[in-house]
C-alpha cells in the first residue's frame, strides 16, 4: 500500500511539473487578444542576479509605446481601456511622424519640426534617430487632422517642407544642409524613486555610477554632460 501511495505521489508531481513547463513555454494569448508576438523585440533585458552591492546584477527592460503604436491603438479599443483618454485628458489619434535627413542622407538630431494646421502649430525636436513625433490638438477629443504644413528649423535656418494630408502618417524629408557634429554628449537619467522602488534604490545607485563611468570611458575625446532627475 505504501509503495502504491509513493508511485501515485510521484506521478502527480510529474504531471504538475509538466503542466507548469507547458505554461511557461506557451505563447498562447492570455487575454483573448494579445500574444508575445504582438510586442516589439526592440530593446533588451539584462541578465538577472542574486543581489549584492555591485553593478550589473539588476534586471532591467525597455518598453516604448511609440515603437509599438499599432498594439497601443488596439489596446485602446478594448472596453476596459477605451475610456482612459478621457480620464487622462489627452487624445493621441492625430499623430504624425517626421524623419529629417541632411543632403547626404544622414539623420539629423535636434532639428525643430513644426506642424501647422487650422491656424495652430505644434512642435517637436528630432532625436538621435532623426525622428520627431507630433500630436495635433492632443487635448481635443473630437478633432480630426486633415491637411497640414511642415517646416524645419536647423542651425538657425528655416525650411518649408510643404503641405501634406493626414493619410501620410510617416514623412521622410531631406533638407539642404550638412549635419553638424560635435563632441559634447548630453545624458539625462530619469529615475523612479517612488515608494514601490524602495527595494531597488541601492541597486540603482550602483548602476548609475557604473553607467556614468563606463560611458565616459567608451567615448574618449568627448565631453560628457550628465544630469539626473529623481521622480518621487
Image (spheres, grey):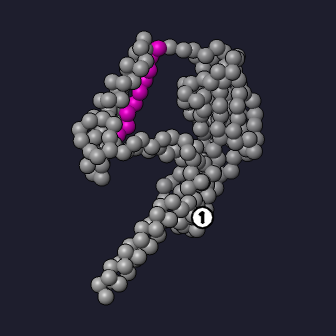
Q: Is residue 44 magenta?
A: no
Q: Is residue 6 above or below residue 208?
A: below
Image location (x, y in percent) of residue 209 = 30, 29
Q: Nearer the viewer, residue 49 or 133?
A: 49
- Drawn side of residue 208 relative to residue 80, left or right: left
- Drawn side of residue 41 relative to residue 229, left or right: right
Check disc 1 and report the residue beneath it.
Answer: 33
Residue visible at 48% across and 41% down in the picture: 44
Q: Which residues are drawn in magenta?
A: 183-192
Whether residue 177 can be seen here = yes
- Drawn side of residue 187 relative to residue 180, left or right: left
Residue visible at 64% across and 14% down in the picture: 178
Whether residue 72 can be seen here = no
Task: Locate residue 17: give its quadrant.
Answer: bottom left
Q: Nearer the viewer, residue 10 or 168?
A: 10
Callout 1 crowding tier (Cα within 10 Å): few <14, some 14–19, many ≥20: few
In the rendered image, the quadrant that contains the N terminus is bottom left
Image location (x, y in percent) of residue 119 = 66, 38
Residue visible at 66% across and 15% down in the picture: 177
Amino acid at each position: 500500500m505504501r509503495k502504491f501511495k509513493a508511485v501515485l505521489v510521484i506521478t502527480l508531481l510529474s504531471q504538475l511539473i509538466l503542466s507548469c513547463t507547458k505554461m511557461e513555454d506557451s505563447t498562447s494569448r492570455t487575454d483573448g487578444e494579445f500574444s508575445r508576438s504582438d510586442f516589439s523585440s526592440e530593446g533588451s533585458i539584462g541578465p538577472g542576479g542574486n543581489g549584492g552591492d555591485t553593478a550589473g546584477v539588476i534586471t532591467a527592460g525597455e518598453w516604448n509605446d511609440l515603437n509599438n503604436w499599432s498594439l497601443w491603438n488596439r489596446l485602446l479599443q478594448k472596453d476596459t481601456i477605451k475610456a482612459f483618454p478621457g480620464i487622462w485628458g489627452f487624445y493621441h489619434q492625430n499623430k504624425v511622424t517626421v524623419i529629417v535627413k541632411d543632403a547626404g542622407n544622414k539623420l539629423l538630431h535636434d532639428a525643430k519640426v513644426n506642424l501647422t494646421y487650422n491656424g495652430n502649430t505644434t512642435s517637436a525636436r528630432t532625436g538621435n534617430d532623426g525622428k520627431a513625433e507630433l500630436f495635433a490638438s492632443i487635448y481635443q477629443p473630437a478633432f480630426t487632422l486633415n491637411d497640414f504644413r511642415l517646416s524645419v528649423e536647423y542651425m538657425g535656418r528655416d525650411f518649408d517642407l510643404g503641405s501634406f494630408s493626414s493619410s501620410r502618417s510617416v514623412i521622410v524629408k531631406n533638407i539642404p544642409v550638412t549635419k553638424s557634429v560635435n563632441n559634447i554628449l548630453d545624458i539625462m537619467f530619469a529615475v523612479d524613486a517612488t515608494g514601490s522602488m524602495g527595494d531597488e534604490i541601492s541597486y540603482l545607485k550602483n548602476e548609475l555610477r557604473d553607467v556614468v563611468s563606463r560611458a565616459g570611458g567608451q567615448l574618449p575625446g568627448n565631453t560628457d554632460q550628465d544630469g539626473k532627475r529623481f521622480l518621487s
